Image (cartoon, rainbow, N blue to C red):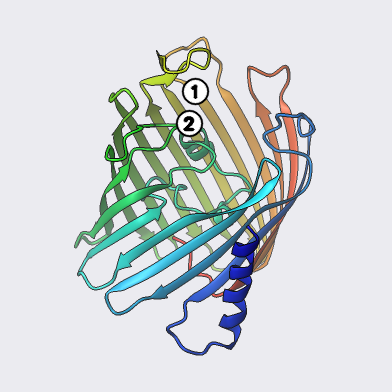
Amino acid sequence: MRFTLTLIIFLMSTSVFAQNKANPDLSLNTLFTIRGGSEGNAADAEAANGFALQEAELRLTSNIDTYFRGDVILAVESEDGEYVVEPEEVFIDTLQIPSVTLRLGKFYPYWGRSNQWHTHAQPFIDAPQTREAIFGEEGFNETGLAVSYLLPTPWYFEVVAQAFSAENTAVFGSDTQDDLAGVYFVKNLWDLSDSSTLELDLGYASGKDVLFQSNDVYNAALTYKKKYADARAFIWTAEYTQARKRFVEDEDNPGTYLSNDGLSALSTWLQYQFQKRWWGQLRYEAVSNLDDSSVDDITKSSALVAFVPSEFSAIRLQYDNIDDPSADEAEQRVTLQLNLTMGAHPAHDY
């Protein structure tokens, strides 16, 4: 850990004096939070009360030559009370194949609306349940290859075929390195007018689990964006993900596997920029058991107000009401976040 932090400081200090474009662009994002919640003092709390460094992300990105571009993202997070540094994404993109891009490495697959967002780029302080409830805390992040093709249509129409090691334990969980999960993604974007767009994303993934059973995941997302003549803007998104992991390991009998119920998650949110530096947002989410209608949904409602002085900083206040049928009462949670970015950070996805 100490060596890694020393390396990070060295890389950032040398970039200050380096003028040669061969050196990569560097950026550092930090997320600080203070949280108070009705369940935040429990020993097994998902989100503990008090101050926290939610995440620090160091990104190095550069064109390697005229043929390849490289990206390295290192994340500093707290795990079991200690900070760890892990590679969040490390990948190479091609630059010279007409209408086609190849991506190789460890990265968030092209999938849905929210999967490729890093923590600081998410519209809310926490990840949507269509990502976290289905794929686990780290989301859908695997090692493999993606081939994307931009079709020559009057609208933006992109098709992506991807292959990854089927190691995501929340969905696949194969214990064989050469078991692959196929991930297929289609993105359509239409200009409805000079100031509004509509985006439709569709995804399907399939891979083997530890018993070599095929597990399937489906995703659909719809996003509408409107920019007004003044500083106001409006965004609405609805995303749905469904997963069927056939078997899970029996906690009481290791090595024994039980049939598993399917799971689905729906997340929809509204974002309204009512002044140049102010946003108001609302979100509703539901996680459902697909095979047992007697199990009530886990629901989550959120409200957020954000003050965004510039593209490099934001202060966000979020309220959550989480209703889990397994708990005695709904959890109430309030979180204040300071979001800061230093350096040349690449543009986020549209």
Percent position of residue 89, x then y = 45, 57
Quadrant where the C terminus is found in the figure: bottom left
Residue with the mark numbered 2: 265
Seen as rendered, the residue at the extreme top is 294
Q: Are marks 2 and 1 in contact (CB under 8 Å)?
A: yes
Location of residue 274 in the rendering, given as x and y in whole percent from the top left corner: 65, 58
**How many neighbours does mark 2 have within 10 angstroms: few (below 14), some (14-19), or many (20 or more)?**
many
Q: Residue at x 52, y 52 (%)?
A: 235
Most foreground residue, 85 or 292: 85
Amino acid at pointer 1 = Ser
**Any mark on residue 116, and which?**
none
Q: Is residue 156 above or below residue 290?
A: below
Residue 158 visible: no
- The picture places residue 185, in percent across and down from the top left corner, at 30, 46
Residue 152 picture quarter? bottom left
Can you identify the residue that label 1 sits on? 288
Instruction: Determine the residue located farthest toward the front in the rendered image.
Output: 3
Amino acid under label 2? Ala
Q: In 3D space, how far apart are the residues under numbered discs 2 and 1 (Cα atoms)?
A: 6 Å
Query: Which residue does the image show at 57% across and 75% down from the upper left?
Result: 11
* Residue at image coords 42%, 34%: 241
Left or right, 323 with respect to 60, comes to: right
Sequence order check, earlier mark of 2 and 1:
2
* Residue at screen point 20% across, 60% down: 153
Q: Decide which of 327, 240 is in the foreground and name it.
A: 327
Q: Position of residue 188 (x, y in %)?
A: 31, 52
The N terminus - image quarter: bottom right
Which one is nearer the viewer's eye here, 56 or 131? 56
